[in-house]
Image (cartoon, helix red, strand yellow):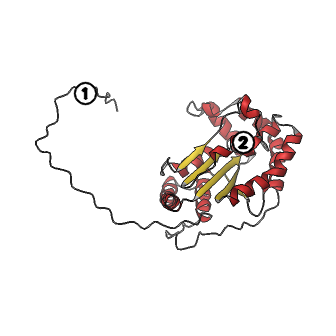
Amino acid sequence: MGKKKKSKHKDKSKTPENTAAQPEVRAGKMSRKDFDDELARLQGELVKVQEWVKETGAKICVVFEGRDAAGKGGTIKRITERVSPRVFHVVALPSPTEREKSQMYIQRYLPHLPAAGEVVIFDRSWYNRAGVERVMGFATPAQVELFLKLTPLVERLIINSGIILVKYWLEVSKENQTERFEDRINDQRKIWKLSPMDLESHKRWYDYSRARDEMFAATDTEESPWYVVDSNDKRRARLNCISHLLSVIPYEAPKREKVILPKRQDSKGYVEPDYQYRKVPEIY
C-alpha cells in the first residue's frame, strides 16, 4: 500500500494534556461497555480540542478516505456527536455540477477549508479523483496523473497557510466489505447507504487496490502523510482513529472557572395558563 513514512507530527499520546489513563489493550471482541467508556473519555478530549480551537483560532482539516463500507461515516459521527456543529463542520460534497466540472478540479473543495476557529472534516475529498473518478472512468489517465503530481504541492500550500491537515485511509478486508454490503441490502435502515456505485466498487476491488497504491506512492509525504486505520473491527477502529487524531493536534485543556448554577428568579405570582396544548401522543 505504498512506502510507510514517518510523520513530523509530535505524538501527544503520553503528554500531560492526555491526562486520562490509557486503556488496557485486550484481544477479542470489545464489549459495548468498554467501547462506550473509552469513547466518552476521548469525546471529552475532543471537547477540549474544540475549546482550544476557538480560543487560539487554530484551523484543522481532517480528510477521510477509504473503500466503500470501510466505516468512514460511523467514525466521523463518533468524532462529531458531542461537539458543536458551529466548530466541527462535516463536508460531504455531492457529484459535481456541470459548472463545477468546468472549473479547476480542486476549486470546489477550497471554499470548504477551515477558517480560524474551525475543524472541517471531509467525508471523501479531493482524493475522489485518485479513487472513484479514476476507477469508474470519470477522469482520464492524464487528469489523474496531473492530480497525483500537483496534490502534494497544493497540500503544502494548505499546510503553509496554517491549517493542520490530517489524512486518514480506512482499510477493510474483502470479506468484511462483502458482509457490510449484504447487511445494507437486508436492513431497511441502511439501504439508503447502498448505491449503484457501491455495488460497482465491490466488483472492482483490485482496481481500487491499484488506485490506492498509486495514490499513496504519490501523496504520502513527510509533511502530509497518510494514516491507515484498520477498520475491520469498527469499535476499535473508531477509538484508534480518535485517539490518533488527538495525538497530532497540539491542543491544551482550557482553563475553566468552576460553574455555579444560579438560582431561578422569583415567580412574582406567575401561574401556568390553562391552555390546551397539542401534545404528542404518549404511545411509548
Label 1 crowding class (10 Å Cα cut-off): few <14, some 14-19, many 20+? Answer: few
Q: Residue at x 85, y 46 (%)?
A: 146
**Amino acid found under the numbered disc labelled 2:** Gln
In the foreground, 44 or 51: 51
Left of 103 or right of it: where is 56? Answer: left
Query: Residue at the location (32% across, 28% down)?
Result: 280
Judged from the image, the secondary structure of the residue bearing numbered disc 1 is loop
Residue 188 quadrant: top right
**Of tags 1 and 2, which is closer to the observer?**
2
Q: Is residue 159 above or below residue 20?
A: above
Query: Mark 1 and mark 2: span between their CA atoms?
Result: 51 Å
Residue for badge 2: 107
Q: Earlier in the sequence, mark 1 or mark 2?
A: 2
Residue 274 falls left or right of residue 88: left
Quadrant occupied by the C terminus = top left
On residue 160, which mark appears? Answer: none
The amino acid sitting under disc 1 is: Tyr
In this view, the residue in front, 278 or 86, is 86
Where residue 277 sits in the image (x, y, percent)? 25, 27
Q: Which residue is mark 1?
A: 277
Q: Locate residue 109, reporting x and y percent.
A: 68, 43
Q: Residue drawn at (72%, 42%), measured in percent from left and top?
A: 107
Apparent side of residue 97 relative to residue 245 in the rendered image (left or right): right
Q: Report helix, strand or loop for mark 2.
A: helix
Which corner quadrant holds the N terminus? bottom right
| Residue 40 seen in the current view | yes
Given contact means CB atoms under 8 Å apart, are the residues at marks 1 and 2 in contact? no
Q: How many marks?
A: 2
